[in-house]
Image: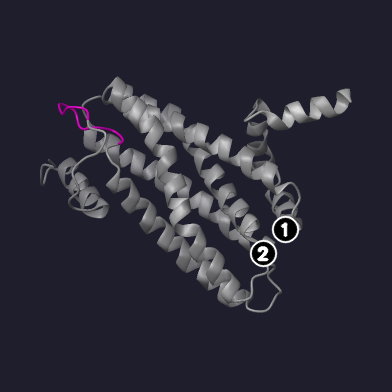
Amino acid sequence: MADSAVRSSKVSRPFSAQDFGIVEKILRDRYAFFEEIREGVGLQAKMKSMLVSSVTFFAIYGAVMGSSHSLFQTISSGVKLPLLFLATLFVCVPSLYFFSLLFGSNQSLRQSLSVILTAITVTSVLLLSCAPITLFFLLTTPSQYQFFKLLNVAIFTISGLMGVVFLYQGIKVVSGSDTEGATTRKWVLIAWMFVYAFVGSQMAWTIRPFIGAPGTPFEIFRQLGGNFYGNILYSFGEILGYMVVR
């Protein structure tokens, strides 16, 4: 009776410090972790731990980004960055799952979601590891808004690419590379990853700002207009002295 009470109390807790231990497990032995997903071992617990970890890490990094502007921007960015990745996940997961089924995949929706959450968790922990770098440049180049913005774009790009590597490896392990239609599913996955990147960048543009331009009042959301890629080119132009970004 006492043992069952202890077990039920552990299950009822919304999160615990043990949830963050899953990050080390993923990074140390990713293939064993993917094999467990393939076998359906503890998928619910894994998804919960990855969700808790990634949301926490994204919130911390978002707060670091927003701290370049104001307290309100710090709080806003700390909330919006986890929402950005969760919203992108919600938009893109159905397409990967159903296209994979169409071309012979035997993995369940939970398995697909677990693999994608693995990639997102890796991205989040790499962002967190770069937070001291971001803080360093924030403190040493306080008036270089465009440089700080491009620095964060570079950090997100590198972290996201590493997450994509984990996603690609995970899908191969969970789906099985020797099953019928494996080659077609590989190209479906590659195409989906590009779609995910475009959706994520446009989603980020839609719910910006995350940093906040100096001298401007705090805004939760900015008026729609332009696009992410054009703004990045303008930022490069301002750093090189060719134009001024408003």
Q: Residues within 10 Å of mark 1 (few under 14, many from 20)?
A: many
Q: Secondary structure at mark 2?
A: loop
Q: Closer to the observer: label 2 or label 1?
A: 2
* Residue 134 appears in the figure: no
User: Which residue lies at the image location 57% right of the left edge and 40% below the top edge?
Assistant: 51
Q: Which residue is mark 1?
A: 38
Q: Is residue 182 left or right of residue 163?
A: right
Picture quarter with the N terminus: top right
Q: Which residues are magenta?
A: 210-218
Query: Mark 1: which amino acid?
Result: Arg
Label number found at residue 107: 2
Q: Is residue 102 left or right of residue 33?
A: left
Question: Which x, y percent locates residue 124?
Answer: 50, 39
User: Which residue lies at the image location 28% right of the left edge and 38% below the top edge?
Assistant: 149
Q: Nearer the viewer, residue 19 or 143?
A: 19
Query: Mark 2: which amino acid?
Result: Gln
